[in-house]
Image (cartoon, helix red, strand yellow):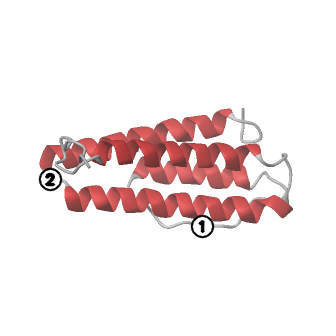
């Protein structure tokens, strides 16, 4: 069996895994937003920081949107958001531990950019504001 060639961070397939994780998070967010109808009381879930401001903003946008969903679906959406938060925090921590210098900064910037893009997608979707 052939191992994938190491990327700039030195770990085999790290860039591929990061893209897959971010794609999964975006898909999760899209599914969460597409499953409910507008209405209901605001959500009450609060989340700890992921360590990346843009990712915290994405999760806050997701929570605000979940607050607009019917009560019967809101708890499931909030649970999915907590899972996404844990995955984003784990990604940031793994990059911090595995990478050094410019590679770490590049990975953190890529994660922040992905979270910013996902945040923009959230506010563009109904019932979140779009």
The answer to whether residue 122 shows anywhere in this view is: yes
Q: Which label is found at residue 67?
A: none
Q: Position of residue 83 (x, y in %)?
A: 55, 63
The residue at 16%/48% (across/down) is 10
Q: Position of residue 4 (x, y in %)?
A: 25, 44
Q: Nearer the viewer, residue 15 or 32?
A: 15
Q: Which label is found at residue 46?
A: 1
Q: Nearer the viewer, residue 45 or 76?
A: 76
Tag 2, which secondary structure? loop
Q: Position of residue 38 (x, y in %)?
A: 84, 46
Could you tell which of marks 1 and 2 lies nearer the N-terminus?
1
Q: Nearer the viewer, residue 9 or 56?
A: 9
Label 2: which residue? 100
Q: Position of residue 41 (x, y in %)?
A: 82, 59
The residue at 51%/49% (across/down) is 57
Tag 1, which secondary structure? loop
Q: Is residue 114 left or right of residue 92?
A: right
Q: Is residue 91 left or right of residue 2?
A: right
Write down the quadrant of residue 33 in the picture: top right
């Amino acid at each position: 069996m052939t191992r994938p060639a190491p990327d700039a961070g030195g770990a085999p397939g790290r860039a591929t895994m990061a893209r897959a994780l971010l794609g999964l998070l975006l898909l999760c967010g899209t599914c969460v937003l597409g499953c409910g109808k507008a209405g209901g009381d605001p959500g009450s879930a609060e989340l700890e920081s992921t360590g990346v401001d843009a990712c915290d903003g994405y999760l806050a946008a997701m929570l605000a949107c979940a607050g607009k969903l019917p009560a019967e679906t809101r708890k499931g959406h909030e649970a999915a958001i907590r899972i996404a938060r844990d995955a984003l925090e784990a990604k940031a921590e793994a990059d911090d531990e595995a990478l050094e210098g410019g590679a770490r900064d590049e990975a953190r910037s890529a994660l922040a950019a992905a979270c910013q893009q996902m945040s923009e997608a959230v506010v563009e979707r109904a019932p979140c504001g779009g």
